[in-house]
Amino acid sequence: MTAEMSVEPTLPEEMRPSRYIEKVSLITGEILDEEILPKQLLVQQHRDYHLLDIHARRMMSRVVRETGSPEEARKKMRQLRHKGRRAAEVIAKLIGQRDVAKVSKALFGLKEKEYFFRFKRPSVTTAEITQRPAELREEAREKLENLSGKGRPALRVLLTGGTGFVGKEIIWQATRDDDIAEMIVVIRPRKVVDRKTGEVVRVLSPAERGERLLDRLWLDTPETRAKFSFVAGDVEQPNLGIATEVLEELGPRITHVVHCAASVSFDDPYEKSFRANVTGTLNALRFSHAVQSMPGSSFVAHLGIETSYIHGRKVKGLAREAEVVFPRNFYNNFYEATKAMASFETERFMLEKGLRVVQLCPAIVIGETKAGNNRGDTKVVNAPVNLFGRAQEALASQDGSWIARSKGHMLAKMACVFPADPTAELNLVPVDRVAAGILAALKKPAAVGERIHLAGDHRLTSQQIAQIVQEELGVKVKLAEPTLHRTVTLPIVTKILKAAKQDKIAHALDKLGTIFAGYSEWGQPIHQVGNDVRVLGLPTPRPNTEHVFRLLCRHNRFVQDFGKVHDLDEISRREKAWWDFMLGLEEETGMPVGAIPADKFHTMMDDRLDTTTFTLLRRGEA
């Protein structure tokens, strides 16, 4: 075994990828008894970034833009690779080099693999894979009917991740769902630290944190707040860290567990992603299985909130809801890889232990449909939009000397270069659609055993996103070839920025390059959708992605001041005024606010909302 294949000494047995994945010879079809390192799951490990490789990718992008056919680009690449191999064979023969692969890699950046990865099959029969979900669906139907009696079902839901972006929306929508009698939110105590001394000033209890959360969600009536309770816990601990006496009291009445807690950091190391996404999921599954097994249990189902990007870099064919195969083009990051592992653990608990489970897989989640409110979220797509907005402010600034303004202008121009192929597509979904799907699944026994994509059927290209950003923020974003930018341009730009003592901007650009490295190239996965409507009964048409992205830009610009408003209480106050303003505008115009052109929206906003004090001037006229 080579040094590269040796097991990382700090990686515990239970965290090794080989628990979920096996390596198979392309030549013999045999399973190779070799340890799999986490880095081997990522596309970066299998890229050379050779000069000719970069040129080939640029050429493929051009073919896609000219022909509109990704398959034509793949065909061209296959032809180029074939010619490269033939040329390498000839050159190797001329120079007396027996290792053709070595010549091929040195001259053309071509890496040949004699193996592929695949996920391990569950230890059940093919018949059980079909029969078990059907049996569990029937059990769930009976359980739900028993809860209903002659009236509406009284659902008592335990929620993890309630303080997160999606979790907050679940709580917000649960207040308006009469079928939900109680929602128990698992939440950790929080230390309040003095920024200057680093000392712990006080510890906020789960109850205190819960009260603050409800305040920030504008849930102020006693009747509404009575639906929610908050218990101390930690998803990375057995039994979700819930005290035994609390569990004994809660367990028999819990009807559903919604496991929404996860890491959404695309640049976390493998171990951290694994603990958050796999260990947390295992703890939640064991918890649900224990609750389901209690005598007299009311338990109906466990809902695992995954991601549609568990399919990784699938550039050919649909990413199907019913199956997950290891992507031949690997994963973009450890977030995707560990979420896929978590999905297989969920499936295993269903097939091997009889746990009634539903898997819900959102695409890239952004602000809600009517106003773009995101409860203070600044991650993923929000991050580059905020960076572009701050860059535009620097470009427009007249403060300081001529030299200072010129310097600021140059730095802002650098920040407005983004690594993205114009044809690359992102699948964005508003958070209210995701939460609506989750709450619908509580009452749909047919969802048990299903994997359901909560995604859009209209994706935005990088070119469309850049155009909307220019219209909404006045920022002209220059799209750069992703591979060339990441390997050549970005290191130079970050070095210049650091020399100019702009470490924050340099770090932000470097982080964005890392986060969006895999999502900005052409040939992004196309996620199959259908179960959201067929199984959950969600309405069609699905949300208009362009409208929702425009709302994201407007919200980030005016409500969050491009990420500079950090206080969650202040964001809540602003979002309430923004919400009332947007609903009034929708009433007045009779159309979704995201459909109103940018210039007209800004004009209408001027005499309806004071964005300095963030107070409503007038709600609008019906």
Image: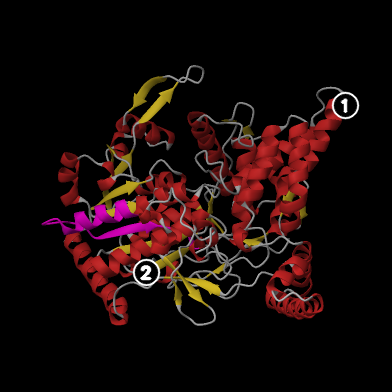
- In this view, which residue lies farthest toward the left? 295
The answer to whether residue 116 is above or below residue 412 is below
In front: mark 1 or mark 2? 1
Q: Which amino acid does label 2 sit on?
A: Glu
Q: Which amino acid does label 1 sit on?
A: Ile
Picture quadrant where residue 60 is located: bottom right
Q: Nearer the viewer, residue 465 or 238?
A: 238
Q: How crowded is mark 2: few (under 14 residues within 10 Å), some or many (20 or more)?
A: some
Q: Is residue 95 left or right of residue 466?
A: right
Give the percent coordinates (x, y) of residue 283.
30, 51
Q: Could you tell me if residue 492 is visible in this image? A: yes
Mark seen at residue 403: 1
> Mark 2 — residue?
450
What residue range appears in magenta? 282-308
Mark seen at residue 569: none
Q: Nearer the viewer, residue 437 or 114?
A: 114
Picture quadrant where residue 96 is located: bottom right
| Sequence-wise first label, 1 or 2 | 1
What residue lies at 83% left-to-right and 31% top-to-bottom? 407
